[in-house]
Amino acid sequence: MGFKEKFAYRKLRKLISQQKRTPIIPKLSLHSKVGVIWQPSEKPAVQYLRNYFNQHGAIFRDYCIFDSDSNPAAEANSLSVKDLNWWRIPKPEKVSDFLETNLDLLLCLAAEKNYAVDYITALSQAKFKIGSSESDNSYFDLNIKIGKNQDAMFLAEQQIFYLAQLNNNKDS
C-alpha cells in the first residue's frame, strides 16, 4: 500500500468514526429504497437485481464505478477516474447525492475492490449493507465470502438468498 492509499484510508477511517449508524435488517416492502454499487463487467447481475427488486415494488438506484481502462459517458450515477482527486478520493460533488440517499439496503457487486468502492460503501447512509470481501475489515453489515467463485451473478443470487433468510428469521 502506497503513501497516497495509506493517507486516503486514514482519512476514510476518520470520516467513519464520525458516523453514528446502527445496522437495521431491511424488511423489503413497497417503496423500499435499494442501491447497488457495481463495475461495468457486472451489468447482467445489476439487471437481475433491478428486475428482482422492481417486481417487489422497491425503488432501485445503481452506481457504476469505472476502472482506469474504461471510457464512460459522463452520467450522474457513475464514477470514473476523472472524478477522483489527486489522492484518488472521489470528488464530493460526484458521490454526495448517492451517499446521502436514505437507502434501506445497499448491495455491492464490485469484484475489484478499490478505494472508491470502499469509500462509497463505508460512507453510504444505507441502513443495511451487503457485499463480498475476503478482508475481515470490510464495510458490510453482512459479508458474503464467495471464495474462488468471483462471479457477480452468483454474488447477486447469494445476496438475495441471505436477505430472504434474514427476513424469514426476523419474523420468527
Image: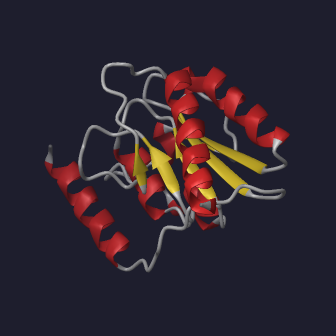
Residue in the image at 67% along x and 38% along y: 74
In-front residue for pair 89/104? 104
Q: Is residue 166 left or right of residue 136?
A: right
Residue in the image at 65% along x and 61% along y: 103
Question: Can you tell which quarter of the image residue 75 is in?
Answer: top right
The count of marks equals: 0
Q: Is residue 60 left or right of residue 146?
A: right
Is 26 placed above or below 22 here?
Answer: above
Q: Say how the picture is coloured.
A: secondary structure
In-front residue for pair 42/73? 42
Residue 72: give x, y in percent of width and height. 61, 29
In-front residue for pair 138/64? 138
Q: Looking at the figure, which quarter contains the C terminus? A: bottom right
Residue 63: give x, y in percent of width and height. 61, 43
Judged from this view, the residue extending furthest toward the front is: 172
Residue 25: give x, y in percent of width and height. 56, 61
Q: From where the camera sits, is residue 34 visible?
A: yes
Residue 10: give x, y in percent of width and height. 23, 64
Is 36 placed above or below 69 here?
Answer: below
Q: From where the camera sits, is residue 64 visible?
A: no
Is 1 placed above or below 22 here?
Answer: above
Q: Looking at the figure, which quarter contains the N terminus? A: top left
Q: Is residue 54 left or right of residue 109?
A: right
Question: Can you tell which quarter of the image residue 99 is in?
Answer: bottom right
Is 95 placed above or below 19 here?
Answer: above
Residue in the image at 56% along x and 23% along y: 153
